[in-house]
Amino acid sequence: MAQSETPLLDELEKGPWPSFVKDLKMAGQKKAMSRDLLRQLELSYKERIGHWKHGGIVGVKGYGGGVIGRYSDRPDLFPGVEHCHTMRINMPTGWFYTTKALRTICDIWDKYGSGMTNFHGSTGDIILLGTTTNNLQPCFDELSEKGFDMGGSGSALRTPSACVGPARCEWACYDSLDAINDITHTFQMQLHRPMWPYKFKIKCSACPNDCVAAIARADLSIIGTWRDNIQMDPGAVKEYAGKLDIQEEVVELCPTRCMSWDEKKKELKINNKECSRCMHCINLMPKALAPGKDKGATILIGGKAPILKGAMISWVLIPFLKMEKPYQPIKDLALKIWDWWDENGKMRERVGELIERVGMRVFLKEMGIKPIPQMIRTPRANPYFFWWPEEVPQKPKSA
Ligand code: HEM
Ligand code: HEM
Ligand code: SF4
Ligand code: SF4
């Protein structure tokens, strides 16, 4: 038997988890690009270094983003991946597909690309992994004819994404799917044509469980919540009482300690004024408890990864906003943020870093939002306050 060309990667066909090496080999039966990708990857495993050249700027007509250009630094050894560009295709919100839609994408990608994909990129896009510069435009044209559009890349609005929300989750406090679909359509210009200091991401989770991790992975995080009382079915609570130690597992784990449990009467009480809507009790007793009826979302700002000034988790900007079609308040807010960031942001400065640089005081003033206690975890510990000149009483001029 001939010696395998990829002995290191072959090891990764063993074991119980679905093997990407097996999948790549399958794609390689049809496409030289996938075969060479596997061979180049083997070299990278051996040398422990990537074999892609730095950067790459390619695209389709009319758009400034959506394609990540990439070239092998060893085209002499791996001619199949001399070009190996990635196309980001905007996924349907919540990643719900018909087999027909997937078949359509596969047929087009089989024709123009490597046959390799990533379902999905971390931001949410369908990732079509590997094609040549010449194939970009015709591939995009055909996808576009079938109703698919490019996702975002570069210093632009990136592809917005949402949790499955009300499609199949009883905790959804607003229609995260509709909101993201609407926002994506409204801001197509900002998505396809980079015009800002840096990237900007929007994510919608319909409750604080935050299944798309909006708080950590979006500059503008929209997280569902409610402002009235948790809905309770006392009969269903009693049923849980047999299976669950409500005192220990629910009441004592409530972060604000706002619940009490009467073991004798099997009665649960919630002091809703003190509830921070953490979801714990609801998560544990989904048949008995549910979010309230007056629903909306908390709007948070600034989430980002470490580069440059350290990782940030989005922080509260608006504690409660109704999220109803046509979502005008959140769209107006986004436009205002972008305007201000565009004027004041440094090159490659995320909006969270800009706010950190100039201060929430300046940001809030520009946004026309009043500072409130919910925006902070604790008040500042140092005394270096700044004041607006108009806040400081002036001495009368000539007394
Ligand atoms: C035995 C010597 C000294 C004592 C006991 C002393 C004591 C103090 C005290 C009690 C304060 C106020 C701290 C506070 O705000 O809580 C202070 C502030 C200050 N001292 Fe001294 N000091 C001494 C020497 C010096 C010297 C030699 C200099 C400069 C050459 C100096 C410069 C300052 C300055 C600039 C501040 C203001 C700091 C600020 O605003 O944060 N001190 N000092
Ligand atoms: C490169 C040189 C210097 C730097 C970077 C510097 C930096 C600073 C900073 C950051 C503060 C605090 C400002 C604030 O509270 O908002 C400060 C306060 C102060 N500095 Fe300097 N400083 C320098 C030189 C000097 C020198 C040479 C002196 C005196 C001979 C001096 C005297 C003071 C005093 C007295 C304060 C306290 C002012 C107050 O409490 O209102 N500094 N400085
Ligand atoms: S974030 Fe909340 S509403 Fe959305 S899917 Fe997760 S649990 Fe359900
Ligand atoms: S949602 Fe969280 S804070 Fe509110 S009552 Fe339940 S456990 Fe307590």
Image (spheres, helix red, strand yellow):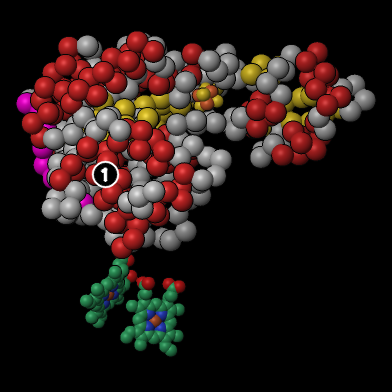
- Residue 74, percent across and down? 16, 54
The reply to whether residue 213 is in sight is yes
The image quadrant of residue 106 is top left
Q: Which residue is mark 1?
A: 37
For the residue pair 106 and 122, the one nearer the viewer reads as: 106
Residue 108: x %, y % from top left: 22, 19
Residue at x-position 32% and y-position 15%: 103
Find residue 341 and report its horizontal and vertical position in percent: 21, 40
Query: Pointer 1: residues within 10 angstroms few (<14), some, or many (20+)?
Result: many
Q: Secondary structure at mark 1?
A: helix
Residue at horizontal 68%, vertical 21%? 286
Stretch of the chain drawn in magenta: 52-61
Q: Quadrant of ligand 4?
A: top right
**Residue 53 lies in the magenta-colored region:** yes
**In the rendered view, does 126 fall on the left or right side of 342?**
right
For badge 1, the amino acid type reads Leu
Q: Nearer the viewer, residue 331 or 172?
A: 172
Residue that sits furthest to the front in the current view: 1
